[in-house]
Amino acid sequence: MTQAGKPAFWMAGLFMALFVADVMAGAFFRAAFLSDVMEALVLAISCSFFVAGILLLEGQEKGDESTTLHREEETR
């Protein structure tokens, strides 16, 4: 993986870890530390960072395909 999407994926992973920790704490210990609204926001933020990382990687790949089409050389 290149450097383009790494920060976005790290942030997505951190927010997802927070979400999973809250769900696990609520399921096993009945001690969830986030409200329902906060859980939804944390999950939405995690998904947003993941999508941003994917889009950054896709954009970088599109920039590299100036002389190729689907990883094959054009024959015109």
Image: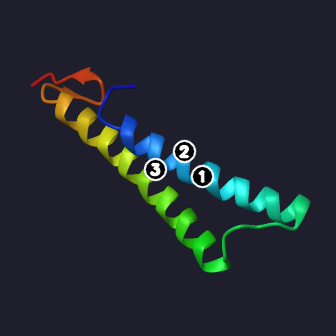
Q: Amino acid at mark 1?
A: Met
Residue 41, image x and y in percent?
53, 71
Gap between marks 1 and 3 measured at Cα: 10 Å
> Is disc 3 surrounded by few (<14), some (14 to 19) or many (20+) residues within 10 Å?
many
The image quarter in which residue 19 lies: bottom right
Q: Amino acid at mark 3?
A: Phe
* Between discs 2 and 3, the one toward the N terminus: 2
* Between discs 1 and 3, the one toward the N terminus: 1
Question: In screen coordinates, is 22 left or right of 46?
Answer: right
- Residue behind mark 2: 13
> Which quadrant: the C terminus?
top left
- Residue behind mark 1: 16
Residue at coordinates 16% horizontally, 24% vertically from top-left? 74
Residue 20, image x and y in percent?
70, 54
**Which residue appears farthest toward the right when viewing the image?**
28
Gap between marks 2 and 3 measured at Cα: 8 Å
Are the two marked residues, 2 and 1, in contact with CB atoms closer than 8 angstroms?
yes
Are the two marked residues, 1 and 3, in contact with CB atoms closer than 8 angstroms?
no
Q: Amino acid at mark 2?
A: Gly
Where 9 sits versus 43, above or below? above
The circle drawn on residue 50 is 3
Where 18 sits versus 32, above or below? above
Residue at coordinates 13% horizontally, 30% vertically from top-left? 66
